[in-house]
Image (cartoon, rainbow, N blue to C red):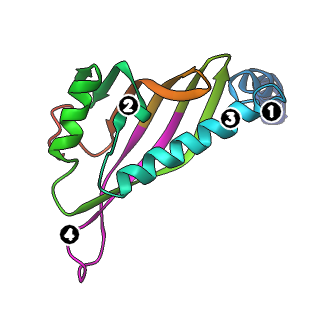
Amino acid sequence: MKQLRLVRALLLSCSAFVVASPGEAADERVQTTAETLLDRIQVEDFISDYYWELAAGAAGDLSLFWTADAVFDVNGKVLEGLPAIEAVYAEGLGPGGKLVFQPVIPQIRIDGAGATVDLVYTGVLNTAPDAAPALYEQGHDHMELVKADGVWKISRRVLRSYSLDQSGEAQ
């Protein structure tokens, strides 16, 4: 009988936690509204265009994607300003071969003329046409975007690889 009362008490306390949790979790979820829908679609298009540009192997005109005073933090290495960011892209990304980054399931939050994007990315490395592609890395991509003159651009971007330590060395 004591065990039954104990089980009931545990279930009751757990159910109270579960009932309280969805309300708190709902505050954290991304909620698209009629007012934010167009901006959200534009940000999704921006992410798609940006990652397609990278997949093409040529970063092109990065001023289309980055603000002049943007900050880019790659595993703790912080680059400030568009010229520093352009220099990193000019050196090439990854170990050689064709490296394609695939964004997955972005969370997009719109706040007026600003937005944040959080997503998981997977880097796939293709070293030769006759070689099978290999997973290179996976990580978290956090972008802070600003909208000026109807155009979204990255003002701050933070990449954290799950498979590399802060020095960029494989673990």
Of mark 1 and mark 3, the one earlier in the sequence is: 1
Calculate the distance from the C-alpha at mark 3 to the C-alpha at mark 2: 21 Å
Of mark 4 and mark 2, the one earlier in the sequence is: 2
Q: What residue would you read off at disc 4?
A: 127
Which part of the image, by quadrant, shows the N terminus?
Answer: top right
Calculate the distance from the C-alpha at mark 1 to the C-alpha at mark 3: 41 Å
Q: Secondary structure at mark 2?
A: helix
Of mark 4 and mark 1, the one earlier in the sequence is: 1
Q: Nearer the viewer, residue 12 or 41?
A: 41
Mark 1, mark 3: which one is toward the viewer? 3
Looking at the picture, does residue 123 appear above or below residue 10?
A: below
- Type of amino acid at the residue the image marks with label 1: Leu
- Type of amino acid at the residue the image marks with label 4: Thr
Q: What residue would you read off at disc 2?
A: 63
As drawn, the label of residue 40 is: 3
The magenta span reads 118-140
- Type of amino acid at the residue the image marks with label 3: Arg
Q: Secondary structure at mark 3?
A: helix
**In which quarter of the view is residue 107 placed?**
top right
Mark 4, mark 2: which one is toward the viewer? 2
Mark 4, mark 1: which one is toward the viewer? 4
Q: Residue at x 44, y 53 (%)?
A: 52
**In which quarter of the view is residue 55 placed?**
bottom left
Q: What residue would you read off at disc 1?
A: 11
Residue 78: x and y in percent read 24, 22
Please give left or right for residue 49 compared with residue 7 in the image: left
Calculate the distance from the C-alpha at mark 4 to the C-alpha at mark 2: 29 Å
Mark 3, mark 4: which one is toward the viewer? 3
Judged by its main secondary structure, the magenta piece is strand
Please give left or right for residue 38 compared with residue 160 in the image: right
Residue 116 in view here? yes
Residue 30: x and y in percent read 70, 30
